Image (tube, grey):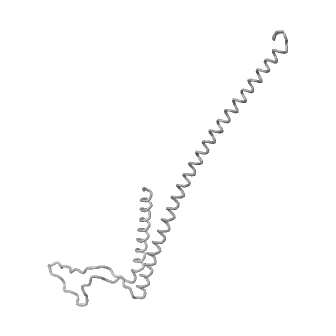
Amino acid sequence: MSLISDPVKPYAIGVGILILIACFGFYTKFIYDSGVSANELAHQKELQKQSTEQQKKYDILQGKFTTADQNLTNALREKKDAEDRLQRGVARGTTVLRVPVSCKSERVSGGETPAADPGASDATYAELDPAARPDYYALRDGINQTTEQLNTCKQILIDERK
């Protein structure tokens, strides 16, 4: 018996070949999909690893900033306490705010020095006027705050370069 003489057999062979092609196609797609999933999984793991490393770096940096902020706050509190003690001492009269000065005699147009005021002394310090004291305290407070902030920023930059 020949294969061609039976009319059903060529169709059966064709259907069998189609089934084999379909199975091969499904098998290939399954292998391809598995490969893509494995690649995607590896890529996701790499991204997760990088994300974890970035989070660790962020946490370290955040810790440094928190420490720097606490140090700044403590330094400013100490300076503010010192300023408050100074202000209370001046208010009680136990401390005197003095400004360094020097008294120089001025020459008049004829080259002569004017006669000294008999009530004045040649002191090296003058007391700060009570009306100017609030401005003095505000200036000192601003200078202390700015100095501490700059020192903190400087320290953060130095630590980051290490």
Residue 132, position in %: x, y?
39, 80
Q: Is residue 92 above or below residue 25?
A: below
Identify which residue is drawn at 36% across, 82% down: 97
Q: Report the quarter where the C terminus lies.
A: bottom left
Residue 17, position in %: x, y?
76, 20
Identify which residue is drawn at 61% across, 44% down: 44
Q: Residue furthest front?
A: 1
| In the image: residue 95, left or right of residue 36 | left
**Location of residue 7 by image quarter:** top right
| In the image: residue 10, left or right of residue 137 | right
- Most foreground residue, 13 or 132: 13
Q: Report the quarter where the N terminus lies.
A: top right
Q: Residue furthest left?
A: 111
- Most foreground residue, 19 or 124: 19
Identify which residue is drawn at 48% across, 72% down: 74
Identify which residue is drawn at 25% across, 87% down: 121
